[in-house]
Image: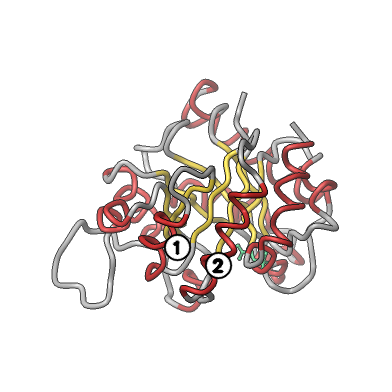
Amino acid sequence: MRRKLAAGNWKMHGLRADLAQLSALNTAHPDPAIDILICPPATLIAPACAACDGGAVQIGGQDCHARASGAFTGDLSALMLKDAGASAVIVGHSERRDAHEESSEDVRAKAKATHAAGLVAIICLGESLAQREAANTLDIIAGQLSASVPNSADATNTVIAYEPCWAIGSGLTASPEQIGEVHDFIRARLTARFGAAQAGGMRLLYGGSVKPGNAAEIFAVSNVDGALVGGASLRADDFTPIISALEAAR
Ligand code: PGA
């Protein structure tokens, strides 16, 4: 059985005062039946780990460099994120693929570096609205999946997040049929490449305007093992009902 995962991506939001949200999450979920991960800005990773010490909430990074160290001003390696207390790193988020022109090959190198550091890589994929309207979604997903997921991926170190770009931060959510089609497709592709034992253990998250009001419907879809949540992860009052919906979907 895959343990479900509720992951929050705070993006470029969060000051030390917001660590109170993590304390509230830990208090609300003392013994959750699922994994809970929050990826705050890198400046908050160490204090967030201190705030969650002894609690169920795990802390992750939002991006990393592909190298372990070097002359890369402003960048952070997966090893540094681990050193600060992170247990996972989001790689290939569409905001990085778009705004920082990261290719799937770049994403693969970052995922490989994440694995080398002993962390879980949450590898993001997703089609644009134009690609969906041109009926290219599965081709795009197949291409991103094969190019972005390194051979080092296994059931314990890799999570795939399907995030249609048009659903991120837009209030639009993919329908259960659209989500199910893509998640079933991703599972089949991973199985063909990594075998049933490894692929069957990799968790597949849906992301894109997941809210308390739509979470239960999304979590009922086949091969949805959790969510990657942006806006609704910033406040414990919003994230808690999403966590509860995922626990209820077991
Ligand atoms: P959203 O973001 O939940 O605010 O749409 C999701 C994401 O970008 O991971």
The reply to whether callout 1 and callout 2 are in contact (CB within 8 Å) is yes
Mark pair 1, 2: CA separation = 8 Å
Q: Secondary structure at mark 1?
A: loop
Q: Which mark is residue 130?
A: none
Q: Secondary structure at mark 2?
A: loop
Report the residue at 58% width, 38% height from top: 203
Q: Nearer the viewer, residue 238 or 120?
A: 238
Question: Where in the figure is residue 202, as x and y percent of width and height?
Answer: 54, 34
In the picture, which quadrant includes the N terminus?
top right
Q: Earlier in the sequence, mark 1 or mark 2?
A: 2
Q: Which residue is mark 2?
A: 10
Question: Where in the figure is residue 59, as x and y percent of width and height?
Answer: 46, 53
Q: Quadrant of ligand 1?
A: bottom right
Position above or below: 32 against 103? above
Q: Nearer the viewer, residue 241 or 131?
A: 241
Report the residue at 54% width, 71% height from top: 18
Q: Is residue 112 in view?
A: yes
Circle 2: residue type = Trp
Q: Nearer the viewer, residue 7 or 236?
A: 236
Q: Is mark 1 within 8 Å of ligand 1?
A: no
The crowd level at tag 2 (other Cα within 10 Å; few <14, some 14-19, many 20+) is many
Q: Which residue is mark 1?
A: 62
Residue 184 shown left or right of residue 117 in the figure:
right
Circle 1: residue type = Gln
The crowd level at tag 1 (other Cα within 10 Å; few <14, some 14-19, many 20+) is many
The quadrant where residue 137 appears: bottom right
Q: Residue furthest top?
A: 197
Q: Is residue 128 in view?
A: no
The quadrant where residue 2 appears: top right
Position above or below: 225 against 45? above
Question: Where in the figure is residue 21, as x and y percent of width and height?
Answer: 59, 63
Report the residue at 44% width, 32% height from top: 156
